[in-house]
Every structure is written in C-alpha cells, then in structure tokens.
Amino acid sequence: MERTSINAVQRPDVNGGDDGTCTQWRNWSGFWLLGLCNNFAYVVMLSAAHDILQKQQSQNATASTSATMAVEFQGGNSSNSSRYDCNPVSTAAVLLADILPTLVIKLSAPFVIHKLPYGFRVLFCAVMAATSFLLVSFSSAVWMSILGVIFASIGAGLGELSFLSLTVYFSRDVLGAWGSGTGGAGVAGALIYSGLTQVGLSPRVTLLIMLVIPFAMLLSYFFLLVLPHSLPQWRDREAEYTAVVSEDRQALMDGSEEEEEQENSIPGHVLPFNVAEDRTSGPLTCTEKLHVIKSLLRFVLPLGLVYFAEYFINQGLMELLYFPKLFLSHAEQYRWYQTLYQVGVLVSRSSLCCVKIRNLWALSLLQVVNAVLLLFAVRFLFLPSVWLVFAIVIYEGLLGGAAYVNTFYFISKETGDRHREFAMAAASVGDSLGIAVAGLIAFPVNRYFCSL
C-alpha cells in the first residue's frame, strides 16, 4: 500500500533540538498570521463599505463599527411598521454578493490552481486585499464600494484554498494555527475597526491604515514560514497535482509512525482516499480526482450543513431577535450578537490542540437544532431574555468553528500524500456552498417576517 511505503521511509532528524522548536514556532506563527490576514480584509470590508455607502447616500446615521459578514441596520427604523423593527432589505442580500465570488473561485480553482506556483498566489491575494481597501476608501459611487468587497471576497476565497493546500507541506499542527488565525480575524477586525473609528478617524483613513494587513501577509509567508524544498514556490508545475515529497513531510510530521500504525490497525478503520494505490508518482488522473471528490462528501456535506444553519441564523434571524425594552439599541444588540458569535468561532477554531471531534455529523445536527430553535423563537417570541440569545450565539460560533478545523484536520490525516493537496483545496468549497444556500433561503424568510 502507498501509505505503508510512505511510513517505511526513515524520518530524517532535521527538526531536532532548538532549531526544530524554532522552526515549529515560526511555522505555527506564520500560519496563524496568514489565517488572520486572509480573512481580515473580507470581514472589515463589509462594515467599512456600509459606512462609506451611508456617507455617499447622505444618510444621517452613526457609522457602523461592526466587522460582520452582513450590512448592519440602524436601530429604530421609523419607516418600518413591522413588529420586528427589521431592515426591509435583508442582510442576506449583501451576504450573497459577498459569498458568490468566493464560491465560484472554490468550485473552479482546485482543478487549475496547481498550475500557479504558491509564491504568485500569495502575491495575488495580497494585491486583491490591498485593492479592496483602496477601492472602498476612495469610492465615489456605490459600484466602487461593491467592487471593493468583491475584490476582498476573491482574495479571501483564493487564499483559503491555497493556504489549506499549503498545509500539506508542513506539520499537521499548522492546521490548528490557520484555523485559530481565521477565527481571530473576526474578533480583531471588529475591535480594530471599531476602535479606530470611535477615536475619531474617518472610515477612509481607517481603511488606509488597514493596508498594513496585506504587507503582513507577505511578510508572514516569505520571511516567517520555513518553506520546504519540495514546495513549488515560483516554478510552474508541468502537469497536475503530484504527491508531496515524503522527506519534507516526514521530517515535519507531528504524529509518530507508531501512532499511525495503531490507528490503521483498529478494526473497521478504513483509509478513505486510497485511490489507485499502486500509483505513487505522476499527475492525478481525472478518475482519481473524481474518486477523491466522492470520498470528500463525508466531510463536505456535514461542513456545508453546519455553515448553512449557521448563516441562516446570522443573516436570516439575528436581525429579528430584537428586545425593545433593553438598555441596548437594536443596532447594538445585533452588533453584540455578531461579536459574541465571532468570539465563539475564535475559541473553537483554536481548540484543535486540546480536543478533536471526529463525528462531524453531530456538530451539523446540533447547529440545525440551533437554527430551528431560533426560527421558532423569532416566530413566537418566546425567548425571555437577550442574555439567553447571547449564550446561544456563542454556542453557535463554537459549533461552527469546531466543524471547520476538525473537517480539515481529518481530511489531512486520512488522505494519502498523493491526494492530500487536491483534497484540501477541493473540500474548501463546503463552507462557501452552505453559506450561499443559506443566503438564498434566508432572504425570503427575512422578508416574510418583516412583512408581518
């Protein structure tokens, strides 16, 4: 078997001692910063675009300071007679505009992106992020702000599948670093953007300061990471995905060979991606890719279901969970929902070093229960306190973040070297697909409640 032959390779002792510890910390820190920088522009763009759109439309409103995945609304909409005091234009409408470019990238890029070396990919993502900041900060029309958000979406989508693929060249623990960094982007984006605007800086100046983020991405990749020799940094690949060079992988593997052998000997344990095991070199064939995609469904489907339920809550229901007799305004309640959700995501995406959850369907079903509970809560208004909603929202973030990091951890763990890079890129479509479907369904649901 291919896996047996890989494990038979003697692991070179190149990571021992202080140098090995230093390399591990550099790689862990590098992937944490890459996760932070990759999602930062996408998260910040949404609220920043809303601020500038308000200025362009000469609306008398307080600048939105929430770095969320939706256009915020102003509390107390006097023109809306609905008992939910909701925005007539659902936040799901903006969500669709944000997620569709990412979805297109993730559906198509895994089949062709291997022809573009990683160095050029990172440069492209940094340029997309910087362009989005510049477009939105200097926008003079609505279409410019929207175009800026689209650039951020493209950069984040391409960056996610590229950096997930990149993890196969490193120790598996960098997946935890990447997940933690992406979780931190939501919280950091909210705090930094909110802080800078509240001290008096305009959204335009704030966004120009944010240009440091794309440069931090470049520094993290080119100077902080210890890149292995087998990585196609600048050179073009002649054909398709090939197996990651075992020497670099084995030198950095975090699990011992004995542990893997014990796992493989467990009764009923099946390696799901042993496609054409006799092929150990050469490009992946179309048949192999189809087999890998079919095997990925056990991961992609529960991940997509988690994100569908999650963003149905965020973009279809959160705006409607309004408690009028509270010291917080409608907009402030919504802002706290989104912030606490991001805190939950950060905690669970950082938990891979402590706990690993193999039953992904359990996380999916629990998230669906959350969505159903809050849907009935919106319809019948039976939740007694906003504090209970705060707790549910944190729990929602914990489930979503845990599903994300555990999905890619077990894909990496259970995939052979030959298929791992393609599998990591292809599986990244799961969350975006779930978000897109959630936006499509949340839009009419939101409009229905607003019409009551």
Image (cartoon, rainbow, N blue to C red):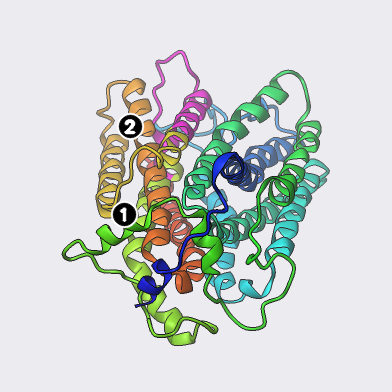
Of residues 30 and 139, which is closer to you in this image? 30
Quadrant of the snapshot with the C terminus: top left
Where does residue 189 sit, x and y in percent of width and height? 62, 34
- The magenta stretch spans which residues? 316-343
* Residue highlighted by disc 2: 392
Residue 259, disc = 1
Where does residue 306 sit, x and y in percent of width and height? 35, 51
Residue 325 among magenta residues:
yes
Q: What is the chief secondary structure element of the magenta stretch?
A: helix
Judged left or right of residue 372, residue 394 is right
Task: Please determine whether, in this image, residue 81 is positioned above or below residue 224.
Answer: above
Where does residue 7 sit, x and y in percent of width and height? 40, 66
Secondary structure state at the residue bearing disc 2:
helix
Q: Is residue 324 visible?
A: yes
Q: Residue furthest top?
A: 327
Where does residue 428 sit, x and y in percent of width and height? 49, 61
Judged left or right of residue 240, residue 274 is left
Q: Earlier in the sequence, mark 2 or mark 1?
A: 1
For marks 2 and 1, give the CA distance. Answer: 37 Å
Residue depicted at 76% across the width and 37% down the height: 207
Residue depicted at 63% across the width and 59% down the height: 228
Amino acid at pointer 2 = Ile
Residue depicted at 59% across the width and 70% down the height: 109
Amino acid at pointer 1 = Glu
Label 1 CA crowd tier, 10 Å (few <14, some 14–19, many 20+): few
